Amino acid sequence: MAYTKKYPLDITPDGDDVYTGTQKIDAEFGELYNILSNIGLVNLNSNRQSVLYGSRDLDGKFNYLTTSGLDVSITASVSVPLVVTFANGFNSNGTNDKIEAITNNVSAWVLSANQICYLYIDKDVNAGLLSYGYSLLPDLYQGSAPPSPMLDQHWFNEIDQKMYRWNGSAWEVKQRVFMAKAITGASISTLDIYSVKKETDSVEITSAESTGYGVISGCEILAQGTPAMTVKFGTVEDNIVHLQSTGKRFPIGSNSALAITTADATTPRIDLIYIDTSGVLRYAAGTPAISPVSPTVPSGCLDIYTVTVAAGATSITSTDITDLRVVKPNYQNMLFLSALDCGAKGDGVTDGTEAFIKLFKKAEKHNTDIIVPPLIYKLTGTIEFNFTKPRVVIMTGATILNYTTTVDPLLHIRSSCTLFAPKIINQPGTNPSPTSTWGEGTYLNSPLLISPLYGEDTATIGTAFSGVTVNNLEIEKSIPGASAVCVLGAVTGIELNNCTVDANATDSSDTLFAGFNVQSNGNSQRLSRVKINNCYVKNLAGEAIPYYLSGSRSLSAYNCGADSAKFGVIAHVGDDGTTAIGDAQLEFIGGEFTNISGYFVQVIGHKAADKSDKKLTSFTFERLRMIGKAGATSAVPLRVVSSPGGVRFRGNYMKDVNTGMYLTDCEGGDFSDNIFENILTSTFTYGGIGIALADKVNGNKFSNNKFISCDKEAMQFLSSSRNIVYNNKFYDVYRTGNTTIDHAAITLASNAQGNYIDKNIFGYSDQLVTPYKWISIKDATANLDKIIDNEFYACASGTSIYNYLSSSSYSLITLIKGNNSKSADALFVGANPLIDISGSLMTYLGSGSPLAGTHKVGDRVKIAIPTAGGYSYKECTTAGTPGTWKGTGLIEA
């Protein structure tokens, strides 16, 4: 809990005199020491390499050093300790200082006669023990090393904030604070005490790590080149975690490599790396599956990474390792100004708005960081984070009840800071709906707004800024029409980590506009370098959007997801209100979207209704798991409305949806390595289809995809040209109807021209459900397509490729060449003599050489019941009717 002053000063005209004030300050620091002694490490801002507190005389002068002859002693006690801070450079949390308190009298120094001695206290770097010594050379404080140093010269580097000692050949780091200068004769004649800093005004020191699991520092897992199937920590130092189940920190000292279990030959799996309840690094292998999931984290343990082990893998690389670490603030390295010192009650009833405003102003004035103890606070107005220097604001464990009564945001970050965020619970009925919007996204009345815009309706453009990190934010309940988290305008270097939004919405009347709304404020106010990591949105209603991402020059989202919403991600090129601004760059990597009833990902590359202003974008979506909502009729993992180039949709898994991809006006995209499973027919126009190339889908690549269980076509081409369909696998497609020539794995319909269908596999040997045809050419304008080097297994009609148009309907040639039928099916049936089927090979299933029919060289018959001493195949060596056939693949007798 917060440190509350027990001996406040009376500064009125008739209040405390100097003596009384000194006594009160002494008593106050005695109380403060009890907290300091349990922490050990603090961030002291400017009070570094100094004495923070010690005993004083009646005049308020420090007297913690006393002399007798050539001896110097320290005067200290439990009630009046000597508190010293040792500067130790910097770490990821800022300044790194070691604090020590001496609580008893110490005979510390015995000096030499007739010398000038510089007294210091030393803290052993390894053991942490205190010792006392002196040097005959003055200690120096400067930004560069002294030239030609003498033995035992001490130099405090003002750049890296460390003390060094010259040992005769090199500078060695010391944790050493110089306390005083003594001039001696036969005894000490002069003792000048120095290194005393002014006491801080009002501070809060807390050890607030006792809630939650997380990584305090380090714990980065890296793949190892040798042995190939191993991973280990990147470093053995500073790997520290905190486990809520034990309430303890654990430094993890061992850095032994973890051996990854041998990969399954045919099926991938996901393994888990975690810290057990004793602080030991552990490994658990997952179960191989088509759609693998990682093992369950054991109770009380902390999961930090997963490792994806591909089928047949013989090594682990960095791309196989997924970071799950939740980073906790290192409270042991910080000194803070407390909300309770500024009048906040934390009772959930008293309005704390004015107290918080005072808190932030006072932190700015005194150049300190902020802590809000883990209590419940009621706020009715905007709290602005508007600092001249970067600040750390810790609200971890605190709950804010949002009773704002205007359309302004609750927390408005306008400058560089790190926020360890609270839980915000919006109070329905008290927050007015926003009255204005920017572009296509509402930003007013957001619980958290990161933007230089401010003032009435945030219409004033303030100073651009960079460097904001928000960790562990929780937002509950929606504000109608608003966005839970909004990043807007000319800001750069923004990170949102481990944040969750639970709208708890029940109908469209209380829906959010968006969970995370990230957008540029027109072309002149572009945002860039935004990262959204491990965030989640759930329980939305109506048209609410979990992630609305627009116009950023560099925006990345990793391991983010959503549940129970109509949409998932809307990726917009950005606009200035009337025209698309373009040059939008987005990566959305990893994560899971479940129970989605509409578009999981929608890409919009234009602003004008006629798409005349569509602009180049670079949108990447990889390794997403997308599961549709039961009973949905328009669940579509990817909808591209317009994109003149740059959409990459790769390595994603889609299940129980109505259409896998619905593409229009899309060029130059890469749609590869995806799995489509259980694509369900519905009233949606393209329901049951894996990929619908609906209009102007030109010059894209579709490769290495798997289509498993589609109610209708795996791919349907309409007015789409120059696409490459390469090395895909089509299983169990067109499960419904399946009686006419339209029922095919791939349909080339109107204006499907110049598409290249190459080296795909259609079906498998023991397939139970087959389409009527594998490829159907069904429109006179579908021409110049190339169907080359594919493999076809059995289909329901007995014909793999079907052209149902007459020759008079054709003016151009479709090339069908080099394909291989793996069954007794006919390869091609059609009336058009202009179609070239040269080079296509047939493989039949039979008992021996065929007795009829016209065959080409290379056609084969697979012997259905092979025998010892017989052949596996008969192969045509001379074309003819039936041609000449020879045995191949002799079976040992």
Image: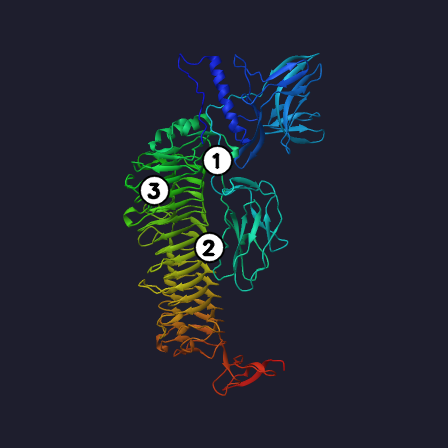
Q: Give the percent coordinates (x, y) of residue 707.
A: 44, 65
Q: Residues within 10 Å of mark 2 (few under 14, many from 20)?
A: many
Please name which of the two marks, 2 or 1, marks the residue nearer to the observer: 1
Quarter assignment of residue 249: top right
The residue carrying mark 3 is 443
How far apart are the alpha carbons under marks 2 and 1?
Answer: 37 Å
Q: How many discs mark residues in the rendered view? A: 3
The residue carrying mark 2 is 622
Q: Give the percent coordinates (x, y) of residue 598.
A: 34, 56
As drawn, 309 above or below 344: below
As drawn, 75 above or below 758: above
The reply to whether dot 2 and dot 1 touch (C-beta < 8 Å) is no
Q: What element carries label 3?
A: loop
Q: What element carries label 2?
A: strand
The residue carrying mark 1 is 208
As drawn, 22 above or below 256: above
Report the coloring of the rendering.
rainbow
Of callouts 2 and 1, the N-terminal one: 1
Of callouts 1 and 3, the N-terminal one: 1
The amino acid pointed to by label 2 is: Glu
How far apart are the alpha carbons under marks 1 and 3?
Answer: 33 Å
Q: Give the percent coordinates (x, y) of residue 4.
A: 44, 26
The reply to whether dot 3 and dot 2 touch (C-beta < 8 Å) is no
